[in-house]
Amino acid sequence: MRLWIYIARRLLILIPTLVGLTFIVFALTHAGGNNLILAEYINPRLSGPAREEAVAKLTAELHLNQPIYVQYFYWLAEVLKGNWGYTNTPIFSGSVTQAIALFMPNTLSISLFAALLIWVIGIPLGVFSAVNRDSVGDNAVRVTSFGLYSMPIYLIAVALILALGVYLKVLPFAGVVNPLLVSNVPWYHNGISYPTHILLIDAIIHGDWVVAGNAFLHMILPSLTLALGVLAGVIRILRASMLEVLDQDYIKLARAKGVPERAVYNLHARRNAILPTVTFFGYTVAGLLGGAVVVEEVFNYPGIGYWTTQALLNNDVGGILGSTLVFGLILIFTSLILDIVYAFLDPRIKY
Amino acid sequence: MLIAARNLTKFFELRGGLTGKGAVQAVSDVDVEVREGEIVGVVGESGSGKSTLGRLLLGLIAPTSGEVLFDIPEELLQKYDEARSANDKKTMEEIASKYSITRKSGRELRALRRRMNMMFQDPYSSLNPRWRVEDIIMEPMVSTGYLTGNEARKRVRELLEEVGLPREFAYRYPHELSGGQRQRVALARSISTLPSFLVLDEPTSALDVSAQAQILQLLKRIRERFRIGLLLITHNIAVVSYMSDRIYVMYAGKVVEGGPKTSIISKPQHPYTVALISAVPGNSRGPRVILRGEPPNLVDPPKGCHFHPRCPMVMDNCGWTAKEVAEELEFLLRGRYYGMLKEGSKVVPQGELEILVEGAKAEEVRKVIEEEKEEVKSLRSIYEVREGNGGALVKLMRYDIPGMYRTDEGREVSCLIYRKT
Amino acid sequence: METQKTEYEADRFREIKTSLSVFFSNKGAVVGLVIVLVYVVDALLVQFFPQALGLKHPYTLVSNYVNPVPQPPSASYPFGTTFPGVDLFTSILKAVRVDLGYSLFVVLLGAFIGTVLGVISAFAGGIVDEFVMRITDIFFSIPYLVLALAIGFVLGRTLDNMALALAIVWWPIYARYARGQALSIKEMTFVEAARASGSGGGKIMFRHILPNVLPPIFVQISLDLGTVVLVFSVLAFIGFIPNANVPELGYLASLGLNYVATAPWTVLFPGAAITLFALAVNLVGDGLRDVLDPRRRS
């Protein structure tokens, strides 16, 4: 019963957070005045009276002469209706929602791949490091993660490109697929695959295993870079929380009772280390999304992050607004879900 | 009169949930007085509201209701009390508006701070670890504008000597001092503006025995020298009996007994005080009274006298309510008298003073009550059992709320036993 | 009295000495400190005595369009050159000043705003607290890189604005941290003692609570500096400052990106310079945390 009240409260808090997020995003993109917005919608080749007419029409349509908080509500109503405005960048021109539908799948696929790598590499290393505290292995893991933690993500990317792409020549490092392979494929036009927009899945759907394999190879380096960028933090958090659990009195008691070490870790420690693990999952999501911006830029991987930088470089209000909103919504709902999972897992939580 | 509290009440609202969860009735309807240069002890177990009372007297927290009259002439206090018995709100308001510290705010209250201060229990958290002793002791002087700059610094040296510390301690930080030294610094701080009233909240209970004795002696000397009225809050009867001139005994947010120290220690009157004093180790006067149960939950304190559920001398009108009696009755009917209560029947309180024993005969219930009355004291409050509503209807007598009754010279007891009829 | 005072100061000195010995027993922290000092000295020299390093144009990159293609490291270009013919070694020397200065600005401004707001929030409680915390929630709900991009976009893409944008996304961390600290300190008896002594809200907040909140904040600052240096260079790398000609390590790395397959040094040297600095700062931060945390003093 308490739990449901807590969840209800948590959902209530969601409302001001969402309003705040949308307002900040809106205010940011409109703080620069109307010129940027007008530039987005009006054909730059228009001039003279035709242009003035277009400006007047757009001003009325977008309520640009109203105070900013009034504009916000008009804008919010449009956003709720699914009209997120227009974006105009070299990689895509069209409605923001279309752009998101197009770019999101790519970001999701490399992020999920990276998350998988983090779980497969990070959790065993973190636990190993804590259990074998101060051993040679632990020190190696710590030094490596410390080094990774201090590297800018573009350096990780370049190092991987040089090692695996340039010298060993085993992995491709630009775009989503070798363009020659898809030049004559009916379900692929202008860099967009159909129906899911995820090339790997679409290729599998159409049974084109060569393209699927190539698309998969193209995912490896961006995902690996992303994973390495987040991994160091994950290992540090996991090691610390595992150490804390291992330091608890009930673990010492279990050991003193003569419970075998393996059972101590598996039965007593790991279960209690799950809670921090949930928290670190949130950290992973935030890290992956932030890292995607850089990784996609370096690898020319057409995801939300690439679109964001393109929007920035081309003064594209719609792109900035749309991507900020998408990133914000993903993180807000991730943290909502995590909080609820947390409440279910932790009997001690009290609200 | 240095300070007099009248009907002082403090409820702490509990937050949480959509509807709120009630309030902790930390202090309810308390009268206390401290005269110039007098040491008044407040004893009670933890949670009895004595610390809250101390903070209320200093205006550190705002009371829910009631007044704290500071520095009020005797005749005006008398007038206030007379007005209170006559329920003359206008006169009370007139006096309170002038003397009550609860009416003062901002600048006025800060001016009052020069004349009253507090010393705390924990010598480790009561001194800011990042301040030097000099700055700590200076704080009240500077904040109230009593002394500033070099004068204040000079005074710090005098105060250090006064509390038995070397002058050089002015440059130290708290973590470089022992617990007893820290309490001396805390004392120097609280007397730095030569206040006339000081609240001491368990000033020695965090110290070891030898340091305790030194601090207590020091307090006595300081009181003598500066004629400061002290309110000494403690759970330690020995400390109170060593230090105080008068004592108040608190239980569950109420003052149950008050009066001169010697008379209370040698002849306690309230059953709680009797139990408290009998529990002091080495006390040879009378048998040791051991109280049953726990102090009550102050969110929903017992009705009537707060002490009645634990009182060894409890009477029929001390505050028994249907809920308490129904609980004990059900316990009996399901235990020793098993079978009287039919399957699925319950003992249901109906309002504050009526209980329905479902499906039971009045005759049988009456017999149980007669047999158990001696043992189960709450049953004494039952005055009638009759058939009705498909069972036995048990009626309780109305309880009385004890007032403060004058007994001996200067003694007051809040117990119906001492009510003059 | 004076002799006592000096004796007392000897005590203090001993106290500081233990702290120092805790710090210096951590080898990593010492190495980190030395590296940080080298960077600081370099930054100061570029700022005040550029001629000592032989720099003619300490605040801009010097291009050579006659030979713009990156050249490998050689005797005259120890780190090689990057596009368009920029000598990497001297450019990195110049860039350290920019990265260090701006990162410090970001962290200090963020910490200042965050700490003040956090302490006020904890002290005021109620609606103020709720409001500030909801705002930090919102800031936390957008990846800081993206939010900094959005803010920078509005402010205009210059180096100064990039730093400002980062500071704006950086304060909520400090607000939460300082609030947590302040809440626990607020419950200490000395705060109540101050109130009983007649001290007002402002004095309690800034003279009692703040000084106790600051030390852990300083450690946080030292730990954060490494991260901010990285984020700053990443922002510059993805093109936040257009055609700036500013010696900044991320920007410097981005110049050679198109040649990375044939001229890896163009990215690796600036990248290594930033990594080394972040590493050193993180090591120092770890050491400082040991000094402050009594449990780690053993």
Image: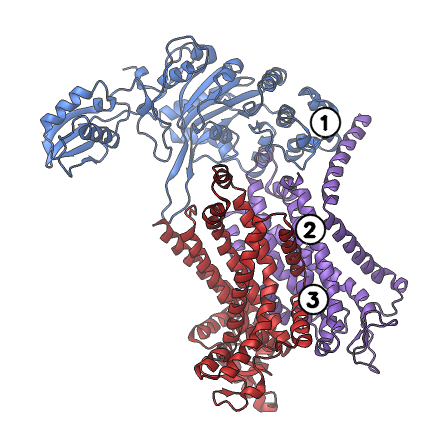
Q: CA distance from mark 3 to mark 1?
A: 51 Å
Residue located beneath label 3 in the image: C233
Residue name at image x 48 percent, y 59 percent = A335
Q: Decide: few, some or many residues near mark 2? Use Cα within 10 Å; few <14, some 14-19, many ≥20.
A: many
Q: Colour of chain C?
A: purple
The chain holding disc 3 is C
The number of callouts visible is: 3
Kindly indicate whether the residue at mark 1 contacts the one at mark 3 (C-beta within 8 angstroms): no
Image quadrant occupied by the N terminus of chain C: top right
Q: Which type of secondary structure does the marked residue at label 3 adopt?
A: helix
Label 2 marks a residue whose chain is C
Question: Residue C17 vs residue C49: left or right?
Answer: left
Question: Of the residues under marks 2 and 3, which one precedes in the sequence?
Answer: 3
Q: Position of residue C152 (x, y in %)?
A: 64, 69
Q: SS class of the residue under badge 1?
A: helix
What amino acid is labelled 1 in the image? Phe
Do the residues at discs 1 and 2 belong to one chain? no
What color is chain B drawn in? blue
Chain rendered red:
A
**Residue A181 falls in which quadrant of the image?**
bottom right
User: Residue type at mark 3?
Assistant: Ser
Q: Which residue is mark 1?
A: B169
Q: Marks 2 and 3, Cα distance to the nearest angstrom?
A: 20 Å
Quadrant where the C terminus of chain C lies?
A: top right
Residue C31 position in % (x across, y down): 76, 52
Q: Is residue C171 left or right of C127 when viewed as pictured?
A: right
Q: Are marks 3 and 1 on the same chain?
A: no
Q: Is residue A331 above or below residue A309?
A: above
Q: Secondary structure at mark 2?
A: helix
Mark 2, residue position: C285
Using the numbered discs, state the Cα–Cα distance from disc 1 to disc 2 in whole angstroms.
34 Å
State which quadrant residue C93 falls in.
bottom right
